[in-house]
Image: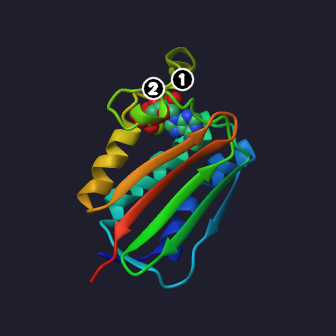
Amino acid sequence: QEVELQSYLSKICEAFQLALSEKNVHIEVNCPKYVNVLIDEERFMQVIINVIDNALRYSETKKILISVEEDNWRVKLSIQDYGVGIPSEDVPYVFDKLYRVDKSRSRKNGGYGLGLSIVKDIVEAHGGKVEMTSIAEKGTTVSISLPKER
Ligand code: ATP
Ligand code: MG
C-alpha cells in the first residue's frame, strides 16, 4: 500500500503512549509531510514496534528520536535513542537470530533475540536495507532505507 509516513508514524507512537508515560520517555517524530512509501502497513508496523520496544527495554533512554529524510532514490528512517548503547564488538551480530547482548542482563528483560532478525527480514522483503550504529553509553541508531516508488 502507499502510506503517508508522518501520519503512519504518529499513529504508531500513539499506540505506545501508555508504555512511554510509564517510563517517562518522550518520542519525537521529525518527519516532513507527504512522504509516501510503498509498504505493507501491518508488516512494517512490526519493524517500528520492535525497534522502539528495544529502545524502551534496553537503553534506559529518556528520549527517542524518529527522523525521516528523503532523496530521489530512497526514504531513510532513523530511530535513535540516547541510552546505554551496544558494545562495538556486539554490533555486527545484533541482526542475527537469537543473538542477545550481555545474556545475563537481557534475559531478565525477556526477549528471545528474534526482534531484529525479523526487522531485517521485513525490511529486505520491501527491497530496503537496515543498519545499526551504536556507541556504548551514548546510544543507538537504527537506520532503515526504503527504495522510492517509481
Ligand atoms: P525479542 O526482540 O525477540 O523479544 P531481543 O529484544 O533480545 O528479543 P533483538 O530485538 O533482536 O532481541 O535485540 C538483540 C539484542 O540487542 C538485545 O537483546 C539487546 O541486548 C540489544 N539491543 C537491541 N536494541 C538495543 C538498544 N536500543 N539499546 C541497547 N541494546 C539493544
Ligand atoms: Mg527486541
On the question of residue 46 being in view, the answer is no
Q: Residue at the location (72% across, 50% down)?
A: 21
Quadrant into which the C terminus falls: bottom left
Label 2 CB sits under 8 Å from any ligand 1 atom: yes
On the question of residue 97 being in view, the answer is yes
Label 1 CB sits under 8 Å from any ligand 1 atom: yes
Q: Amino acid at mark 1?
A: Ser
Which residue is disc 1 drawn over? 106
Circle 2 residues within 10 Å: few <14, some 14–19, many ≥20 = some
Q: Residue at the location (48% across, 71% down)?
A: 8
Q: Earlier in the sequence, mark 1 or mark 2?
A: 2
* Residue 118 in the image, given as x and y percentages of width and height: 33, 44
Extreme-top residue of the structure: 104
Circle 1 residues within 10 Å: few <14, some 14–19, many ≥20 = some
* Residue 141 in the image, given as x and y percentages of width and height: 56, 49
Q: Residue at the location (68% across, 40% down)?
A: 83
Q: Are marks 1 and 2 in contact (CB under 8 Å)?
A: yes
Q: Between tags 1 and 2, which lies in front? A: 2
Q: Amino acid at mark 2?
A: Arg
Mark 2: which secondary structure? loop
Figure quadrant of residue 27: bottom right
Q: Is residue 30 above or below residue 132?
A: below
Mark 1: which secondary structure? helix
Q: Which mark is residue 100?
A: 2
